[in-house]
Image: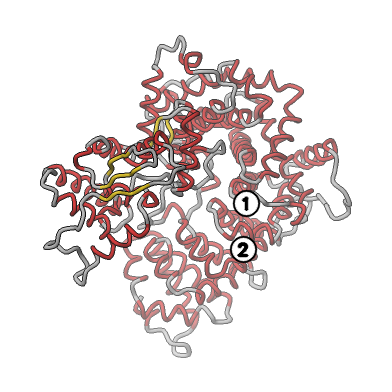
Amino acid sequence: MRGIREFSDGVMPIECFKGMASLLSTILHRWPPSRYTVWNDAKLLEVLEVMRVKPDFSVKVAVMKLYTTIALCGNGAKKLLEKGESLLHIMVLCMGRSHPISVRIEGFRLAQCLAKNEEGCLKMMSLCCDPFVKAIIDGMSGWTSHSGKIANDQMSLLLEACHLALISRWAGEHHDCLWEHGIDRVLLKLLLHDFQDEPLQQLLSLEEQLSIAREGLKANFLLGLRPYVWDLLGWLAIHCREDFNPNIQGCELRIGILITCACISFVDSIRKGHQICQNDVADTLRSEAASRAVMMMIYSPCKYIATKASDMLYEILRPTSKEHLKRLMHMLKIRPSMDNVGMPNMLQTSINLVALVCYSGIPQYQSHIVENGGIHALMDLIWWCLRNDIHIGRLSLAPHLHNTLSERTCCWICKEDWEGNNILLLYGLWGLAELMHSGSSGNTVEIFGGQVDYTEAQFVSTLQGICSDNSGTSPGIKWYAAFILKYFGLYGFPCKLGRHIVKALNMNEYADVQLILTNGNSLSVHGVILSAQCPPLLPSEEMSHYEKASNGSSGGYDTKSKPEKLHKEIRLSSHVDNLALAKLLEYVYVGYLNAGEEPLKKVKILAKRCNLQSLLIMFGRRHPKWGTPFPRYDLSLALAPAGLYFSYGLLLNPQVHLDIMFNFFHVLYFHELVHSHQRGIV
């Protein structure tokens, strides 16, 4: 380090710098504790900034390698990203076609480290989205083949570019850039090398699309890259905008062929349907990625992609669909023993589950699945996963998501993955949610009739436990558990804290706000709860009054003065229904509400006026958008000045016992302390 820090051009040979940089890179790669002294050395980083702009390509390689090993440390990556556009500009240039492949590879590897988590990725996209995406597209498309083979160095570059392109797993403006720069054309070239779409002046018929796709896939071109292609196609679909129009983009034909290729690969995996042998693991891994891509397209928010994928899959499956579905249902009812819970069995179970989720998304098959015990099969599998504490993440089923860099990282704090480390449970809940709300599921008596392993009450309680704050499950799993609870009349997000706070809902003597309806009826509530959970129920002038009163010169509330009026009376509009308001308050206090179809209509109107977006998602029929955070019961606003003012008013009420308020604030403080720790504040 001292040699690099004291390096000055012209005094020491450039080969000496390269040698020292190479040695330091090796040390940082093998010994994580050494990284701190490097990324925390301002003088050394200044020398690297000077050296990275040298015209000598071998110097650029040395600097990029050193940057990459620094970025293996999460804190080191943050330090590099603080340099902003200056570093990213050089990195993107090194990824471009004007540089030798060795330089480009190191540029891609550095970018992978900086984009290891969503925060780093979005930071880079905010600074250089378009050139960054263009470099990825160039890396994935600037290759040539001879007799179906690609040179080793070009293949290495292609692999690095494909791996970096997996930033598509996160939503953001880079998705629009990927479409604009022709990601569809790139993916199609990786699947069907000889496909030419320019001479075609009109859309192909279904038979023509199937013929082109089948012949191209049979060529077995770049088989090792197909999992990347399927994953990218799936991520692009699940994050695609609802109004995305391929006609405007000029890519309707290419997207149609890509969807057809994925559906063919998906159906082939169903038709095989056998246990995995050692010699076909690679083929099954590709089948897993293809099946997952089809699932994500069927459930894409983009209406065009979702409709196209559903229609194409239905047409391909139609000749033998019932036979394959019957075999699929049989395989899903077979549970691996706990002595045989290994990757092959879990991989096959995952593929079967994804297949059933795809079938469940096609209306023509929903009633047939239900009639043949699909709901029972999924419920049994969910129960089996929970009872045996099965934890299999996608990383375990997709080796292509790993690389040598990811195995050497340290000090990274990554945001909780939306799908989590229990992929079987996620798929099971996903399929069950789709079937239960399809209109073919019947009633709860039919579903739980004859069931001996668990009752309806046990199943509902289990789903509520999954949604709980401390369940340890991922946001995606929680969302689908909450969606299934809708079938049982429970709308919202059950949590442990809500079960404590709900006790205050009927404690009218401690309430400080009265909501008065036009018919004369009134409901007594706690302003501190409303201010945190549903501020629109409090008039803006009241909120501003509380905030003004609580924001004195000292930044707190005046402990010597007494609020002018302890009980605030708020008169509501004539459009507010008494029962609807009671149900909405149930949601505000508990985190969810229990209601039938008739009261829900009025609750929906009230929830919309109160801008309770999370609750409105639950009222809809569509699945949660991939990556949507699971709402948490957040009373932290009650610790803000306005909330403290409300609570202080309660403390001045002689009828309110101090131990009740102490317990209330203890719950608030503990709740905020836990989430502050999760956010890295404490």
Residue type at mark 2? Val
Per the image, the residue denoted by label 1 is 241
Q: Residue at x 26, y 55 (%)?
A: 643
Callout 1 secondary element: loop
Q: Residue at x 46, y 15 (%)?
A: 448
Q: Are marks 2 and 1 in contact (CB under 8 Å)?
A: no
Callout 2 secondary element: helix
Q: How is the image coloured?
A: secondary structure
Place of residue 23 in the rendered image (x, y in percent of width and height, measured from the top left):
42, 69
Residue type at mark 1? Arg
Residue 224 against residue 66 in the figure, above or below: above
Q: How many marks?
A: 2
Q: Tell which of 595 and 549 is nearer to you.
A: 549
Per the image, the residue denoted by label 2 is 133
Q: Earlier in the sequence, mark 2 or mark 1?
A: 2
| Res. 565 in view | yes
Estimate how packed mark 2 is, as few (under 14), some (14 to 19) or many (20 or more) residues with alpha carbons within 10 Å. Answer: many
Q: Which quadrant is home to the N terminus?
A: bottom left
Q: Is residue 395 left or right of residue 560?
A: right
Q: Is residue 294 left or right of residue 373?
A: right
